[in-house]
Image (spheres, grey):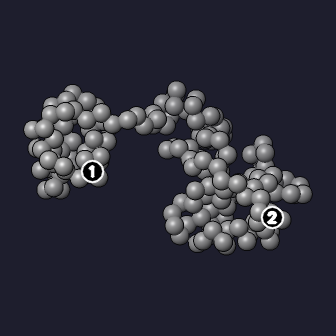
Amino acid sequence: MRLKATIPNHPQLDTAIIYEKSPYSYYVYVISDDHRHGFDTWFGDIESAKYHCESQYGVSPGTWEEIPDVLPGALPQFEVPTVGIRDETGKMTFISYAEAQEREIVPPKPQQIQIVEDPELIANVRVLINQGKYIHAMRLYKQYTGCDLRQAKDVIEHLMNVKDNT
């Protein structure tokens, strides 16, 4: 979950974003529109994070709006999916998530899982999963189907979360 609000009347900061990293870990990012100024602060709950923004930056409680969660590899302090890249000199530049995908800096967008319809293979994979042999299950699926390791991992994770209806 991420929330965004405008910071009124501040000389350098324009936006506050609250990012829920876990149920007990929230980060407040306060940033300028050009991203030259900003920093983050950790809070244990969302109420404390909102109160901090209200007391420190004048953010009214009713001005928060929900924005989409970050994508894998994207930075949570940006409203739109953005990736930071550090060059050889240490300088940080920011590019769009789409460009980062094109340059293969972040993982490709997850695609729908395609599971081979072979009851015997799936039964054998499930036996390995039930024995806690996840790597063996991935190897078996990958070897039999010819898919890449990422696809095999996704299938195994899916099968671990879906009840066997046979």
Q: Earlier in the sequence, mark 1 or mark 2?
A: 2
Asked whether residue 38 is in view, the answer is no
Label 1 crowd (10 A; few <14 / some 14-19 / many >=20) = few
Residue of label 1: 162
Q: Which mark is residue 109?
A: none
Position in image of residue 164 (x %, y %): 19, 50
Residue of label 2: 60
Question: Image quadrant of residue 146?
Answer: top left
Q: Report the residue that reaches farthest toward the front.
A: 165
Q: Residue at x 16, y 55 (%)?
A: 130
Q: Residue at x 48, y 30 (%)?
A: 104
Whether residue 19 sits left or right of residue 136 in the image: it is right
Q: Nearer the viewer, residue 164 or 86?
A: 164
- Per the image, label 1 sits on a secondary structure element best described as loop
Whether residue 126 sits left or right of residue 95 in the image: it is left
- Per the image, label 2 sits on a secondary structure element best described as loop
Q: Alpha-carbon distance for marks 1 and 2?
A: 44 Å
Position in image of residue 28 (x %, y %): 67, 61
Q: Residue at x 29, y 46 (%)?
A: 158
User: Considering the image in quadrants, where does the N terminus appear?
Assistant: bottom right
Q: Is residue 59 above or below residue 157?
A: below
Q: Is residue 9 above or below residue 111?
A: below
